[in-house]
Amino acid sequence: PHGLAKCKQRQIPEGVETRLKRVFHTSATIQLKDNFDMGSSSDDEARPDPATQNKLWTQTEVSDLKLGDTWFVVDQKWYVSFLSYIKGGADGYIPREPPDLDNKALVVDPSAQAKYDNVSVLEEAEAEFAEALQKHKKREWVLRRGLQEGRDFALISEAQHKLLRSWYKGGPYIARKVVQALSGKVVELWPLQLWAQLDSRDQERRPMLVSRTMAVEKLWELGCKEAEAGEGMEARLRSHVDPSHVQRVDKSETQSLEEFGVENLSVLVFSERRDRRSNVFQSAGSGSRIEGPISLPCPPPVSATGMDIIASLDEDTSEEEAANRRNAPQAQGEIEHGKGLCGLGNMGNTCFMNSSLQCLSNSEPLTRYFLSGQWKHDLNTDNALGYSGTLAQEYSSLLSEIWSKQESLYPRSFKSMIARYAPQFTGYSQHDSQELLAFLLDGLHEDTNKIRKKPPTETPKGDGTNDAEIAALSWERYKLRNDSVVLDLFSGQYRSELVCPKCGNVSVTFDPFNNITVQLPQSNSVTVSVTFHALDPLTPPAKVDLEFSRTHTVSHVKAELARRFMSSASNIVLACVWYSEFRQFYEDTDKIWEYGRLKLDDDIHAFELDTEVPPDFSNDASSRFRSNYSTSNYSSNYSSSSSLYNGGGGIYGGGGM
């Protein structure tokens, strides 16, 4: 256009060129380099208009994940502004062109970590690893913990990322691979952070960001290259959590790192081979070795009084046999008071497993049963519902360590075995303690089930008048297929009653259980903390605590706020704010108890508008509300706990709704 041609002959103020291009949306080449440095990524001449960008972006969209493909992590806030720009705003609203891509908030920044004194050990270790990546000029990045897709970041395909790189400056470019997990194909956002080191006395460590699905032999090759080690050297993995734990790495091992039990931030140490005839012990079945003088603790024998408990639980034990056990001489080193006080080290977030194991370990009848060795006589390796006796063997070994040590230990072998038979507990993330406890009780029962051949049985049914008879018969038939010490200690029966609404027929059954889910007592009222923002920008925000019944909804919250602040409930918007962003808007029908959309620990804010809130506000109108208000310039003289009022990003800038 002629307007742009004339501008070329003049000295153009900074920013004018970009605004002109946004108005004309011309794909024609605009040569202004002589008088103005455009400062864009790959030159603004190569950046298409929004419609063309949207077309190319849509053509490169990928819906399916393929193994080995590379995906890229981009900042969610930037990504939303980019999509809004290329797709256009609603109701004639013209979105602003996004700035350069900025992913720095997603990665671990070593310089930023150094500013804080309250960083955790894990954060400090990951900051050190990230600093080493930069030092060795590796274009790899460590993502911060706790990030969520859709809130903090978005994933785009490699083809889409190439488009962004050709249109915009910025970075860093965070690439992640698609791997095969137990739940299916996933983008591995947090690969393992490992170190390679030549000899343990060498202070120089080289960082390696590797996939959990990588084979151990591939890790050996990569570590050998990074540490500049010789082919004839041996390699060992030293745990970051417990440096005394060392695991030998065989360069012919084909297991994946996850199956091998490699922990995050472990150190792969290469050293010269040495004679290990007298100072290496390899634990059975685990593949891990312990170096140093061998001192194998013998599990303490069980006391005679401990056997009385087992005898009383075993229906096949006669009174004469029980008397013989009582009169038997006491074994040396019987379990004394204070034994078994052994801590279990946390390997990531395995406190759910440690707490369950401590509960079982302190169930004395079961512990005496395993430490005495009686479980070996009941071991059932042919049970199709069991685990070939492996679970019972591993649990017995773990108990022997717990009840013979005074210091803490790390149950790595037991954790690996659990992950092998219960994939839902794979990795080092948080899981439900009760689910693991139920798995352990059921598995130990099946591995020590005395019934080798289970006969077919029918479930007895009563009419409610003969409960004692039906309960005894149900338990008798259940014992025909299930008989173990675990069953005797931890099982019971539920009474289940069904009544036909038409004929009134009553059917009563008794079903076995080994654990009961009990809900914690709760009060009928809940307290909701809300920060109210008045329409008048000179009125500071006010945080109030409101008490409601669990059956109340968001409409009751609005009504109470309107009463307290002399407003109208129809003019109030209730929203959850997360890191200066609107996470979600609540509808009037949303419940305010903990299982509804409104969570009691949410950062809830109420905003007074100058018009009534439309019925469809939570859908279409809320996106416009976000665009107009969440990024507008606002400066407040009032102090508030909400980060919305700490500089830009206030709610009151940019006009009314």
Image (cartoon, rainbow, N blue to C red):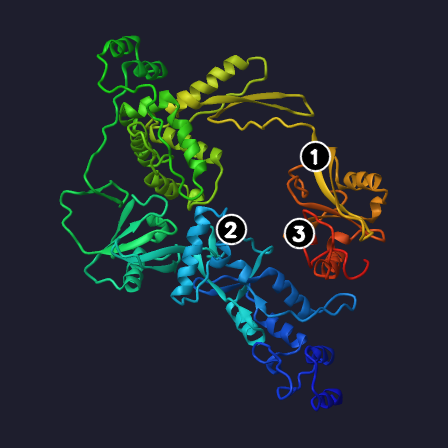
Q: Is residue 109 visible?
A: no
Q: Secondary structure at mark 1?
A: strand
Q: Which residue is mark 3?
A: 643
Q: Nearer the viewer, residue 608 or 646?
A: 646
Q: Name the spot of residue 130 as percent of width and height, x first.
A: 43, 59
Q: CA distance from mark 3 to mark 1?
A: 22 Å
Horizontally, is 270 left or right of 57 in the view?
A: left
Q: Is residue 204 visible?
A: yes
Horizontally, is 202 left or right of 102 in the view?
A: left
- Look at the picture and state if 595 lies above or below 106: above
Q: Nearer the viewer, residue 547 or 518?
A: 547
Tell me the crowding category of disc 1: few under 14, some 14 to 19, or many 20 or more residues within 10 angstroms, Cα based. some
Which of pointers 3 and 1 lies earlier in the amino acid sequence?
Answer: 1
- Look at the picture and state if 485 lies above or below 239: above
Q: Which residue is mark 1?
A: 527
Which of pointers 2 and 1 lies earlier in the amino acid sequence?
Answer: 2
Q: Residue at the location (46% across, 26% down)?
A: 514
- Contact between marks 3 and 1 (CB within 8 A): the answer is no
Residue 116 - label: 2
- Three-letter code for the amino acid on which mark 2 is drawn: Tyr
Horizontally, is 595 left or right of 380 in the view?
A: right
- Contact between marks 2 and 1 (CB within 8 A): the answer is no
- Three-letter code for the amino acid on which mark 3 is drawn: Ser
